[in-house]
Amino acid sequence: MIAVPLHAYQQRWMRDPARFKLGMFARQTGKTFTTTLEIVDDCFAAAVEGRRARWVILSRGERQAAEAMNEGVKRHAAAFNMAFDAVDFDWKGEAGSYKALEVTLPGGSKITALPANPDTARGFSANVFLDEFAFHKDSGAIWKALFPVISAGWKLRVTSTPNGKGNKFYELATGKDERWSRHIVDIYQAVRDGLPRDIDALREGIGDDDAWAQEFELKWLDEASAWLSYDLITSCEDPTAGDPEGYQGGVCFVGRDIGRRNDLHVIWVWEQIGDVLWERERIEQKRATFAEMDEAFDGVMERYRVARACIDQTGMGEKVVEDAQRRYGSRIEGVLFTGPSKLIMATAGKERFEDRTVRIREGDPALRADLHKLRRVASATGAPRFVAERDDDHADRTWAAFLGIHAAGGPTVEYGYRAAPRSALLGHNSRMRSDDYEADDLPDPLSRQPLGARLRGGL
């Protein structure tokens, strides 16, 4: 029984009784909504037949698990006029405790939603829904833990948009075996089947060809030459990163990539917590005046305890760096974008991602595509160089992030200060002076060898 109106592609998914079912759906097409409807419908049928159904929803994180439960399961149960009891609790596994949400339906059927990891994957004997599986961290380990559990006749539902080729979802979606029933619904098919979406507006809104190809056209982007794979990017995403309200008052490092007409002007703020850099704020401007760009940068310097800021000094960045150094002194380092300097910054950035010592905003398609589009290629002389294919902004977000990571490299000194008045910051002859600080015997907090000196000394 289906108590909710569905588009044709959703009906095909709902009515497919296959035990192993995979759906690769474009973004904003209702894959979680439709699959949670199937789960509730199965529980309804179980109640009518006098039996119990058991389902577990494994999502990429606590927030997504809560959305699947609140926006999916509970809404569908209400549409079926099914009373339910809802609880949340700390589910304890072998490796730790996890926030779980659970609904009990008439007849004793239960649906539990919680974040996916190998621990939760092996913790239940139930039908399983892997929601946005391509974005699960350690998807291969989750699969190894899960499959023996569902081998005793349980159903398995797997849905996602693509996320590169380095994950278990890619392997399942491109498999040739007939045990899986595979549903592929790109944005064009969804609109043909009745989904009310303006394709041109969506494409313009996402503003990135790679992101559009992957998120809406379901294309598998090449990972071979990507400097940062999608799997690596996903492993460093966190739902609490990228929110200025999460700033804990720690020392921050800033990267600033200069662009005006065709490129983005990007300011990236990292906060250091322990050995991890957390994205706190990212400002993006296009076709802004230099005054507007400087105003945005001054705001960052006022709001955060910035130990060091590295700014792209190439071309139009010369004056930007000079003005920033006049206002903020030795906390500002200008970086000329040359082949060797980009290699140093890109290498340091990749090492941070590989070591999982950065946390970036979760579920940001433009950022993910920007980080992924950077590729290392060989020049005619054999020297390595970095390019960003099929874009209008040359991976500006990525370079701002790498500039900030470079700023955080090497030893720094904890300091305290009071922010200078904004009028002083914007004055013609303003410059941060030693008496603007409230620390005893302050050494230079940025005392490390600048990138220029490192290059002169050799790679």
Image (cartoon, grey):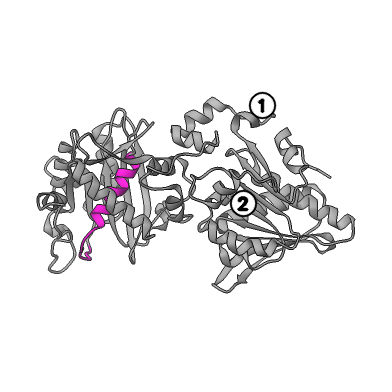
Residue nearest the observer in this picture, 235 or 82: 235
Where is residue 34 drawn, in percent x and y? 70, 44
Q: Is residue 314 left or right of residue 297?
A: left
From this viewpoint, which residue is outermost toward the right? 49
Q: Is residue 64 left or right of residue 333?
A: right
Q: Secondary structure at mark 1?
A: helix
Q: Can residue 423 be seen in this snapshot? A: no
Q: CA distance from mark 2 to mark 1?
A: 24 Å
The disc at residue 192 is 1
Where is residue 229 drawn, in percent x and y? 42, 48
Q: Amino acid at mark 2?
A: Asp
Q: Residue at point 57% right, 74% down?
A: 94
Where is residue 374 drawn, in percent x and y? 35, 41
Q: Quadrant of residue 263?
A: top left
Q: Secondary structure at mark 2?
A: strand
Q: Quadrant of the N terminus?
A: top right
Q: Is residue 420 left or right of residue 282?
A: left
Disc 2 packing (10 Å; few <14; some 14–19; many ≥20): many
Q: Is 409 inside the magenta-drawn segment?
A: yes
Predominant SS of the magenta segment:
helix
Q: Who comes first in sequence, dot 2 or dot 1?
A: 2
Where is residue 237 drawn, in percent x and y? 45, 53
Q: Is 338 inside the magenta-drawn segment?
A: no
Q: Can residue 15 be seen in this snapshot? A: yes
Magenta highlight range: 396-416
From this viewpoint, which residue is outermost toward the front? 177
Q: Is residue 420 left or right of residue 198?
A: left
Circles 2 and 1 in contact, beta carbons < 8 Å: no
Q: Amino acid at mark 1?
A: Arg
Q: Which residue is mark 2?
A: 131
In the rendered view, would you say 114 is above or below 303?
A: below
Disc 1 packing (10 Å; few <14; some 14–19; many ≥20): few
